[in-house]
Image (spheres, helix red, strand yellow):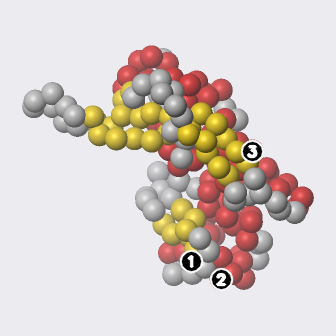
Amino acid sequence: MGKRTRIINEPSDIVLLLRSFGSEIHKIIFSSLQNEWKTEEELNEEIGFETKDSLAILKKSGFVESKWRMPDPGQKPVKEYHSSYSRVHVNFQCSVEDLSDLIMITFKNDSEIRDDLILIEKEVEKGNQSMNGLQRAIDKNIMFIRGLAKRSPILSVKGQRIELVGEAE
C-alpha cells in the first residue's frame, strides 16, 4: 500500500515528531502498524507491553490514525490503528533560540514542564486562548507556548489559539 508524506511546516511540530520517534517503544508500535490495522489489544499481545500511552502520542502527532472495527454480532466495536505516513518532509525556519526551546521541551521530563503547562492550562480555562494573550500572561515566547501545548495531552493548537481538548489524566 502506498503511504503518504507528512509535511511539517510549523517549527513546534518538531516536538511531536521527536517525541514520537525518540522512543524505541513508539518506533516499534509505529512499525507494527505500517502494514495492517490492529486494535490496542492486538498490539499489546504482539509487542508484549501496554501500548496506550504510545498510541496517544502517535495519534496526537498525526502519525497514526484510528477507525472503529465492525464487531461480530453481540460484541462492542473497538478502535483499530494504522500508521498514516511512511515519509516526512520538514520545511521550516526559526531562530536558534526558538529551536533550542523546542528541543528542550521535547526531551524534558514531565515534572520539569509541569508548572508551565499548569499555568497555560489555567489561563486557557479562564478564556485566555490567544497566543499574544498567553505570551503576556505567562511571560514566555509564543514558540515556547506552542511547543508546550503540542506536548500536552489536553491542549490543542488551533492557528493562533490554544484550546482544551480533553481531560487531564
Considering only vertical position in the picture, is 164 above or below 37? below
Horizontally, is 75 left or right of 90 in the view? Answer: left
Q: Earlier in the sequence, mark 3 or mark 2?
A: 3
Residue at horizontal 83 percent and vertical 56 percent from the top: 99
As shown in the figure, which amino acid type bears the numbered disc 1? Gln
Q: Are marks 2 and 1 in contact (CB under 8 Å)?
A: yes
As shown in the figure, which amino acid type bears the numbered disc 3? Phe
Residue 110 visible: no
Q: Which numbered disc covers residue 165?
A: none
Residue 150 position, x and y percent, is 62, 57
As shown in the figure, which amino acid type bears the numbered disc 2? Gly
Q: Which residue is mark 1?
A: 129
Instruction: Give neighbour class at mark 1: few <14, some 14-19, many 20+ (Cα, 10 Å).
Output: many
Q: Between 120 and 32, which is closer to the camera in this rendering?
A: 32
Q: Between 52 and 94, which is closer to the camera in this rendering?
A: 94
Residue at horizontal 48 percent and vertical 27 percent from the top: 1
SS state under label 2:
helix
Residue at horizontal 38 percent and vertical 22 percent from the top: 42
Q: Which numbered disc covers residue 133?
A: 2
Q: Which residue is mark 3?
A: 107
- Residue at the outermost front position: 2
Q: Gap in Å between the C-alphas at discs 3 and 1?
A: 25 Å
SS state under label 1:
loop
Q: Earlier in the sequence, mark 3 or mark 1?
A: 3
Residue at horizontal 54 percent and vertical 62 percent from the top: 155
Horizontally, is 150 left or right of 100 in the view? Answer: left
Residue 101 position, x and y percent, is 81, 58
Residue 85 position, x and y percent, is 56, 38
Horizontally, is 43 left or right of 71 in the view? Answer: right
Residue 106 position, x and y percent, is 72, 48
Quadrant position of residue 97: bottom right
